[in-house]
Image (cartoon, rainbow, N blue to C red):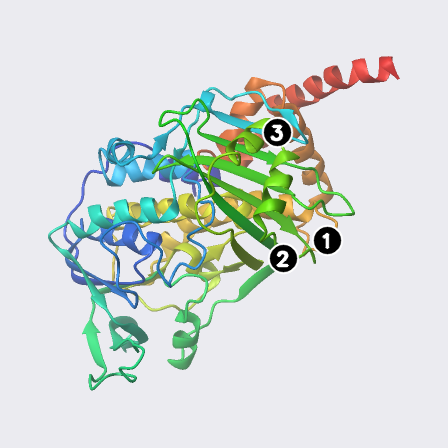
Amino acid sequence: MSESAARVFARLSTDEPITRTRTLMGKAVVLGGSLAGLLAARVLSDHAESVVVVERDSLPPAAAARPGTPHDGQLHTLMHGGRMQLQRLFPGFEEEARAGGAIVSSPYTIRAYADGVPKVSDGAMGLISSSRPFLEALVRRRTLALPNVKVLTCRAIGLEFRGDAVSGVRCGPVSRPGAGIGAGVEEWVEDADFVVDAMGRASKLGDWLEKAGWERPAMRRMAIDIDYATGYFRRTTSDPELAAAIAYRTPTATPPRVASGAITAIEGDRWLITLANYGKQPPIRDVDEFRKLCGELPPVYREAVEGEQLGDIFTYHQADSRRRDYHLLKRFPARLISLGDAVASFNPIYGQGMSSAALHASALSHYLRSAPDLRRHARAFFADQRVVVDAAWQISTAADLARPDVHGPYPRGYRLTKWFAEQIAEASVTDREVAVRFNSVTYMRSHPSSLAAPATLLRALRVNRSSRKPRRERG
């Protein structure tokens, strides 16, 4: 009997220490040195004699922006599910993050507002609040400190195959301004016993597979047209009572100027504030408008922007959510997987990206610790990964489909599931028990199917009926 999706998710989101590791291969090659690639390299370090990370950017030694992550100035949230996985992979990670200036929040230092109404705290889950460059630099430092992991600064331009398996990665030099393409260096093949595609949304793996006669994964897209505007402001206290807040508005036929706003206390005694809007509205670039819009949100936003502005307002646009369904492929090379945004990237407003990547790494760890036959297609890995992708996709697209400017594709039974989700979300505003279950899903600690339990729905209906009754009596 196969495992249910909920059981698979629980297995991958566990906080139990990683044990039973053994060497399975000589050299593993990871394509991409962003967060997903670094986490894959950390997992592979337990099972490979050597791990090579192929990355075209020169990776900075400390926290800094880089060309390969143009969105790294925006808000990034390490949700509870991802936080647990980083602690598993890097024992002491939270203590090191806190020592570097990140805020490790408790559930009582996080605030949420639904249409201006404060939501009850779940009393259970917290976050690590920091900038994306800070978090990535910490993961990079811990990963590259491993004796069998190194970085090659070059371009991945294709794959080599031997029979039904990947045997290497074709690499080329990085073009530098003024140096000319190649600068006299020839292309070469980096031999590999296992290859991980962590090349992000722009992954070329599908092209390479098709060119070599393999199946290309279908890509699903959902148009979202979201714009981010992020500002940094001086924070006057190093130990704030508030670590993070999220304020969102119910979708309407006329999109508000700010659909949601998020604020986090980050390293360097700074506030990071992100405002998100949809549709055909112009990006928010002017600091005066930014401060004015924050003043229309709950008071914590107005208070944060009263401090000194640090740098410009950063903007970012994402046109769609997308996923590549590798789990559906009948023919796929052995010794090859894909993970992170290369498989699925979601509307960033829901903060699932980094935690999804961490759970993909957990799926890779479980696969390699299960004594797999590496001569065969890694179906077991892709089956586990699909559970994580489906969960995050369900959470994000359900919220996107509620918007009047998003027009599908609608999943089967959408109207009924939408009604269920609305009941749970409404009850989570005032009822702590429902909030715990709801947040466990949105923070990627539990599978969405846990919200379908009859007891949860019945409780939500009772809570909502009770909260509406006084309004009807007053009317």
Residue of label 3: 298
Which sits earlier in the primary sequence, circle 2 or circle 3?
2
Please indicate, yes or no, whether residue 201 appears anywhere in the rendered image: yes
Residue at 43% over, 26% down = 125
Q: Residues within 10 Å of mark 1 (few under 14, many from 20)?
A: some
For the point 44% across and 41% down, which residue is it?
77
Q: Which of 136 and 450 is in front in this view?
A: 136
**Three-letter amino acid code of the residue under disc 2:** Asp
Judge the density around disc 2: few (<14), some (14-19), many (≥20) Cα neighbours within 10 Å: some
Residue 283 x %, y %: 61, 55
Instruction: Identify the element where label 3 is drawn.
Output: loop
- In the image, residue 194 sits, relative to residue 428, either above or below, namely below
- Circle 1 is placed at which residue position? 405
Q: Name the residue under label 2.
A: 225
In 3D space, how far apart are the residues under numbered discs 1 and 2 (Cα atoms)? 9 Å
Whichever of labels 1 and 3 marks the residue nearer the N terminus, that label is 3
Horizontal side of 436 relative to 452 (left or right) equals left
Give me the residue at 70% from left, 58% from top. Answer: 280
